[in-house]
């Protein structure tokens, strides 16, 4: 089974299109799949659009009464997938704003079927690109990637902050059982990097790999929800504490 985790906040303009794209791509995945969609306190009717969708891919809708941020949405979705999944399952993390194409899931699956526990859709792998992204945002994301690599000494990963990735359920479950409700503590969008760092304590850098990914930011409708400077500060705080995640095997998480 492939579980597709979609955190969504005010994505009524895009969510039905994305679910239709998942329906179209699903026959290429080999395994059966389902969507776990966490509506994080949306106020634009996102949940109603999800309920109206009648495609072949099962969709489990989880709702927060108020917005808890990306970390809260991911925490809720991960808890559900860990509870309901089983050994051998795969978990895909995606954005709900149409910038991540579901067609890439079959390639993520092929890569993880090799000798990998985590496969990242990387903007910085050979063949990867960022379309529709401002020069300022590109500089920030490339700078963050360089800082991650220098601070952690992980050579197999170049894109720590991209939210599009596949993780083996077994590895995610071990990580979740170690940290519980403290799995994601970083502020803002830096929690995507935090998750990867904590997963590293339950696998080896050699079992992380990347495939090239073209980020289609021009497909995004509406304003970005990422507070840039808050994310930068959150990333720096995260890296300050990062070695305990890897070196302690998560034991400091409780």
Image (spheres, rainbow, N blue to C red):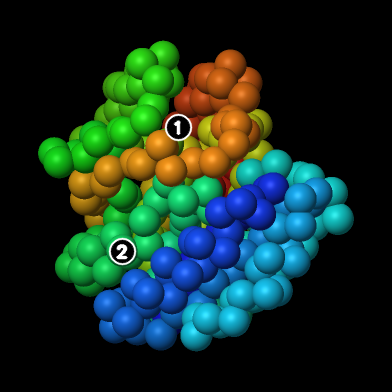
Q: Which of pointers 2 and 1 lies earlier in the amino acid sequence? A: 2
- Work out which residue is located at the far left of the displayed protein and give it: 126
In the foreground, 73 or 41 = 41
Which corner quadrant of the image does residue 187 belong to? top right
Q: Which residue is mark 1?
A: 243
Left or right of 120 in this view: 85 = right
Could you classify mark 2 by the number of other residues whose Cα lies within 10 Å: few (under 14), some (14-19), or many (20 or more)? some
- Can you say whether 61 is above or below 216 in the image? below
Residue 119 visible (yes or no):
yes
- Confirm whether residue 154 shows in the render: no
Q: Which residue is mark 2?
A: 103
The residue sitting at 61% across, 52% down in the picture is 13
Residue 93 coordinates in the image, percent (x, y) = 47, 57
The answer to whether residue 15 is above or below residue 61 is above
Mark 2 secondary-structure assignment:
helix
Quadrant including the N terminus:
bottom left
Q: Residue shown at 41%/85% (left/top)?
A: 32
> Mark 2 touching mark 1, by CB under 8 A?
no
The label shown at residue 173 is: none
Residue 113 in picture, x, y percent from top left = 22, 71
Q: Nearer the viewer, residue 124 or 186?
A: 124
Q: Which residue is at the front of the view, 128 or 91? A: 128
Q: Nearer the viewer, residue 42 or 120?
A: 42
* Relative horizontal placement of residue 106, taking residue 81 as reference (left or right): left
State the SS at label 1: helix
Picture residue at 21% right of the left edge, 46% below the top? 212
């Amino acid at each position: 089974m492939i579980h597709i985790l979609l955190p969504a906040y005010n994505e009524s303009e895009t969510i039905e299109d994305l679910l239709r794209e998942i329906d179209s791509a699903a026959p290429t995945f080999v395994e059966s799949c389902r969507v776990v969609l966490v509506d994080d306190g949306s106020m634009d009717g996102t949940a109603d659009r999800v309920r109206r969708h009648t495609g072949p891919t099962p969709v489990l809708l989880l709702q927060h009464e108020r917005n808890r941020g990306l970390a809260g949405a991911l925490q809720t979705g991960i808890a559900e997938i860990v509870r309901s999944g089983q050994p051998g399952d795969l978990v895909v993390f995606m954005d709900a704003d149409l910038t991540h194409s579901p067609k890439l899931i079959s390639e993520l699956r092929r890569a993880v079927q090799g000798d990998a526990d985590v496969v990242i859709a990387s903007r910085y792998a050979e063949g990867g690109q960022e379309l529709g992204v401002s020069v300022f945002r590109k500089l920030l994301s490339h700078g963050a990637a360089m800082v991650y690599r220098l601070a952690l000494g992980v050579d197999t990963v170049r894109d720590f902050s991209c939210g599009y990735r596949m993780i083996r359920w077994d590895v995610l479950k071990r990580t979740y059982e170690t940290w519980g409700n403290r799995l994601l503590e970083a502020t803002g969008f830096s929690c995507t990097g935090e998750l990867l760092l904590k997963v590293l304590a339950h696998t080896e850098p050699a079992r992380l790999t990347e495939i090239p990914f073209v980020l289609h930011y021009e497909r995004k409708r509406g304003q970005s929800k990422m507070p840039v400077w808050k994310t930068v500060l959150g990333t720096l705080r995260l890296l300050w504490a990062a070695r305990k995640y890897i070196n302690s095997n998560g034991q400091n998480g409780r």
